[in-house]
Image (cartoon, coloured by chain):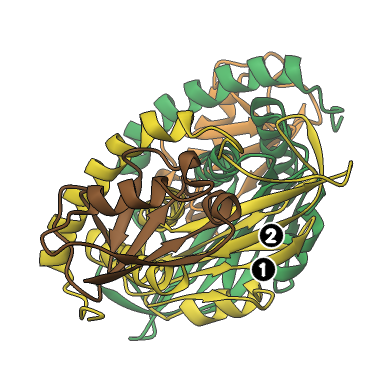
Chain colours: A yellow, B green, C orange, D brown
Amino acid sequence: MRSGITTAPIDSAALLREVAAPHNGATVLFEGVVREQNEGRSVNGIEYAAYRPMAERELTRIVQECCAQFDTADLIAVHRIGRLDIGEASVVIAAAHPHRAQAYEASRYMIEQIKLRLPIWKREEYADGTREWVGQGRESGIGNRESAPAARSAYASRNEEYDSLFPIPDSR
Amino acid sequence: MRSGITTAPIDSAALLREVAAPHNGATVLFEGVVREQNEGRSVNGIEYAAYRPMAERELTRIVQECCAQFDTADLIAVHRIGRLDIGEASVVIAAAHPHRAQAYEASRYMIEQIKLRLPIWKREEYADGTREWVGQGRESGIGNRESAPAARSAYASRNEEYDSLFPIPDSR
Amino acid sequence: MIVTALLFASYADALGTATVELALNSGATIADAIGALRALPGGSVLPSSPLVAVNLAYADTAQLLQAGDELAVIPPVAGG
Amino acid sequence: MIVTALLFASYADALGTATVELALNSGATIADAIGALRALPGGSVLPSSPLVAVNLAYADTAQLLQAGDELAVIPPVAGG
């Protein structure tokens, strides 16, 4: 069981080897990759920024939850930050389990939680030279005003529940 | 889009590279691996046998169906046959897609269809030196007598439907 | 007519061979061929209505056979 | 009391900084701190009730702040 935020390229083959164990019958590897277009715009690359200590803490927590929920410790989740080119992996997740259904479900759980909870942002660089933070209105905060409170409540109640399950030393 | 039956070890990292393309945002790799026990018995290794020309044909068909259903051609499925040790991959499937939900679903579709339809059998070698074909009563055919007709009908109707979608040259 | 029957895994072990050349009457069905196989030494392990394929495609046991057909008798599959 | 506010992504761009030291009255809540941030030049891009974390854990804006807390104002996340 391991998780991390890194600026270096992620070696997927090494992750596959790392989760392998004689008791496992299935391994599922997920790679999230920078692609050449998003919502119809041509993309040259993406810069990922993180609130790194919190992202590390949340990612640790996600992997711990996954371990408890799917009964396997052979899990790794790594998120890369910094400037990535088209075709480079921003996130790689490996999950191994005696049975395939749980390996798939564990993998899916981790990526969905990562997308929902990890304090990481991406700025797309477009073919026309402009850059834009994805999912954030540049001038108004209208989209955020509506969605943030609901998201915050969800996060807050989730934190309470998980804090009791997986206490993490307070940074203070 | 590629499929194959092979006696050689499968290079998962090569499959990952092969399905990569600038339009893809997600890759899911599945490895089915020989594990050290099955149904409580300690396993030393597994011998996989195939009706090879039919297995190749069915696997080609499965990948073609997956391509049509999930709208991506970046799919590879390889099944290994022969004698495998614990920890060796018997099947490796790579699926890439612009979006992650479809990459997961395409991967899952292929492995489930492989388990259901590929004419491949495995003989487990146990720690006590005995060997046994998995899922087949050694002396009676009772389990088969009940399950085979239903399976056969399912296969027959599936074949009719798929033959019209994906005609494969007849071997005669 | 001659039809080639292929046996696999536990079925091949039981009959002691992976291939049987069957001499059948014209108009014989897959079910007739299965009956002939079950009458061979060790053939009683075969279900009376097993999963079968003719010329690489899954088939129904009521199907008529042609001279030269390749009939595969398929034990429960266990790939993956 | 002094609370350190962290800004990220578009919020940091709008306020021209990633860190703001806020001087708040004792008994101030996260909502009070957000109000102070929104009064800064460029601060109007912040939602009135944004997603926030205190000392690395997601928090509710009604929560009281302590001297030395690290308050992160979190734009919609986009990891993965």
**Is A43 located above or below residue A64 in the figure?**
above
The quarter of the displayed image where residue D33 is located: bottom left
- Amino acid type at mark 2: Glu
User: Percent from the top left, x then y, of residue A166?
Assistant: 18, 70
User: Percent from the top left, x then y, of residue B20?
Assistant: 78, 54
- Amino acid type at mark 1: Gly
Q: Chain of mark 2?
A: A
**Is A112 located above or below residue C67 in the figure?**
below
Residue A44 left/right relative to C22: right
Residue drawn where x is 30% and y is 41% of the image: B142
Residue drawn where x is 39% and y is 85% of the image: B129
The quarter of the displayed image where residue A89 is located: bottom right
Q: Which residue is mark 1?
A: A82
Q: Nearer the viewer, residue A88 or C9?
A: A88
How crowded pointer 2 is (Cα within 10 Å; few <14, some 14-19, many 20+) is rated as some
Whether residue A6 can be seen here: yes
Which one is earlier in the sequence, the residue at label 1 or at label 2? 2
Q: Nearer the viewer, residue C77 or B101?
A: B101
- Secondary structure of the residue carrying numbered label 1: strand
Q: Which residue is mark 2?
A: A47
Residue B68 left/right relative to A79: right
Q: Which mark is residue A114?
A: none
